[in-house]
Amino acid sequence: MNTPLKDACRTAMALGLAAALASPAAARDLRRFTFPQAEFLPNDEGMRLAQDFVAQALPRGLPMNEAITRVERAVMACHDGHRQDGVVNCDFFINARPPGGDLGEVYWNLSLWPGPHGVLQSVSLRRSYVGLPGYVGTPVTGG
């Protein structure tokens, strides 16, 4: 049995859902983040999205194996912690030629620092550009 109150509630819920889905933050959350995607975004938006990914997808206390799986889904290659501290390094690189610049590589690095009991303690994120011989590499942005 439909009543004016039920109809009004349905309309309000539909409008609220439409507004939430139309917001930029919701659009960002709905698409699957990848480092290749971030590399082709304008200005510093790629680094901002990567930092959002780290903050949302890699919370402290997450089991290390789940953290590695999430980073690999974002198209990074992870290498098990062979160092004494057990840090897992993950990376993504791509050839690039910035406008007016030399051919080189953009390199993304994510380090996963384990804590006690095999859980994630901290994460570091870095993006840098290194040119070919004759060009000195310089950090682009850091996290």
Image (cartoon, grey):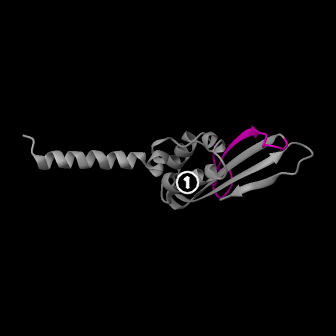
Q: Where on the picture, by quarter, is residue 74?
A: top right
Q: Position of residue 104 (x, y in %)?
A: 81, 41
Q: Is residue 96 above or below residue 12?
A: above
Location of mark 1 (residue):
54
At horizontal 49% and vertical 41% (from top left) the residue drawn is 31
At horizontal 69% and vertical 58% (from top left) the residue drawn is 142
| Nearest the eye: 80 or 26 | 26
Q: Crowding at label 1, few (<14), some or many (≥20) Cα neighbours within 10 Å? A: some
Q: Position of residue 86 (x, y in %)?
A: 63, 55
Q: The N terminus appears in which quarter of the rendering?
A: top left
Q: Position of residue 124 (x, y in %)?
A: 63, 58
Q: Is residue 92 above or below residue 59?
A: above
Helix, strand or loop at label 1? It is helix
Q: Does 88 sit left or right of 9 as displayed?
A: right
Q: Does 62 sit left or right of 10 as displayed?
A: right
At horizontal 18% and vertical 48% (from top left) the residue drawn is 8
Q: Which residues lie in the magenta part?
A: 77-102
Residue 88 is a magenta residue: yes
Q: Where on the picture, by quarter, is residue 140?
A: bottom right
Q: Is residue 123 above or below residue 105?
A: below
Residue 8 is a magenta residue: no
| Nearest the eye: 21 or 137 | 21
Q: Residue furthest left?
A: 1
Q: Does 69 sit left or right of 16 as displayed?
A: right
Q: Residue furthest right?
A: 134
Q: The C terminus appears in which quarter of the rendering?
A: bottom right
Q: Which amino acid, mark 1?
A: Val
Count of marks overlaid on the render:
1
Q: Position of residue 83 (x, y in %)?
A: 69, 54
